[in-house]
Amino acid sequence: MPPWDAINHGMIGLSTGGFAVTDNSIATYGSRRIQVALLPIYYLLLRGRLEGFARDRQTQWLLLVIACGTTLAPLIMFTTDSLRSTAHDAITVTFQFVSAITCTGFSTTNLDSMWSPGTVLLLTVAMIVGGSEGSTVSGVKIVRVVIFEAGVVERIGEPFPGIDSSRDIEISGEHVSANFHNASVVLVLWLLFLLGGMVALFVLLPPENESFQHVVFEVASAQRNVGLSSDLTSPGRSRAVKSVLIGNMWVGRLTVLPVLVLLRGSV
């Protein structure tokens, strides 16, 4: 990669900007080594702090989801001809899944024509779930999923809890106060806005463009501010379609609650 491109892509990757300096993103360079170089490296491991890595629940969840996703994607594509294409080797699948879940937005393949519907939906789940607290990504974030998971497990063991829904759980090696109720509210509201954007696009788009997996993918990418596209969004789309996606991008960046506070204050 030329030095100027490398400087720009390095800054874009660290800030999860979702852009690239070429029309075809990282696919322009056709290099597996560049893909590997752009995959995230865990900072604590570079400093030799293995004990911090072992206790970091967000990192554990992130790596677990990446492992499951990069294993399931080839299995899903096994039923299609796309698996036989050299464009879908292990590095490409891993790179695209990591790009989606980390909200980085780099692309190495055409999601519209070369990925099966099931794989596109798998990337959509990665975009919805991914992202860690303290990073520049928007969306649900893994920490809320961790809190929600802990809350569900506790509710199964204790169906009738007390009034206080706050508990101490371990995240990133530290015990923090986690409120299951707040995490559930944000998660549900985020999914409701996602559903609203999907319904709006199904109404506004021409019937030939109403591919379920592409509509879901496009709205999730907008609300997560990822930058990936299934080619459903284009300059020729109507202002109404663009307005819906702008709304989802705005809601995702502000993480829902500030938007609701603003709307409530304007009524």
Image (spheres, rainbow, N blue to C red):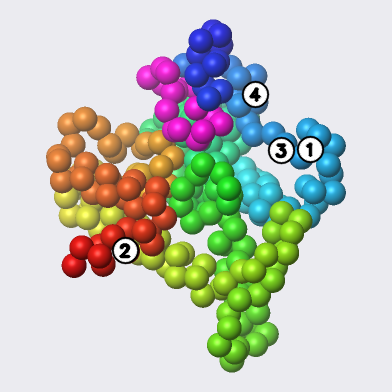
Q: Residue at x 37, y 19 (%)?
A: 23
Q: Secondary structure under badge 3?
A: loop
Label 2 neighbour load within 10 Å: few <14, some 14-19, many 20+: some
Label 4 neighbour load within 10 Å: few <14, some 14-19, many 20+: few
Q: Position of residue 156 (x, y in %)?
A: 63, 83
**Residue 188, quarter of picture:** bottom left
Question: Which of the two discs, 2 and 3, sits closer to the camera?
Answer: 2
In the displayed structure, would residue 8 be above or below residue 252?
A: above
Can residue 76 be seen from the camera position used here? no
Q: For the residue marked with disc 2, what is the amino acid?
A: Leu
Nearer the N terminus, badge 2 or badge 4? Answer: 4
Give residue 37's mark. Answer: 4
* Residue 199 shown left or right of residue 70 in the figure: left
CB of mark 1 within 8 Å of CB of mark 3? Answer: yes
What residue is shown with label 3? Answer: 42
Q: Secondary structure under badge 2?
A: helix
Can residue 63 be seen from the camera position used here? yes
What residue is shown with label 1? Answer: 45
Give residue 126's mark. Answer: none
Q: Nearer the viewer, residue 96 or 224?
A: 224
Asked if residue 235 is among those painted magenta in the image, a careful observer would answer no
In the displayed structure, would residue 84 be above or below residue 214?
A: above
- Residue stretch rendered in magenta on the structure: 12-27
State the quadrant of the N terminus: top right
Q: For the residue marked with disc 4, what is the amino acid?
A: Ala
State the quadrant of the C terminus: bottom left
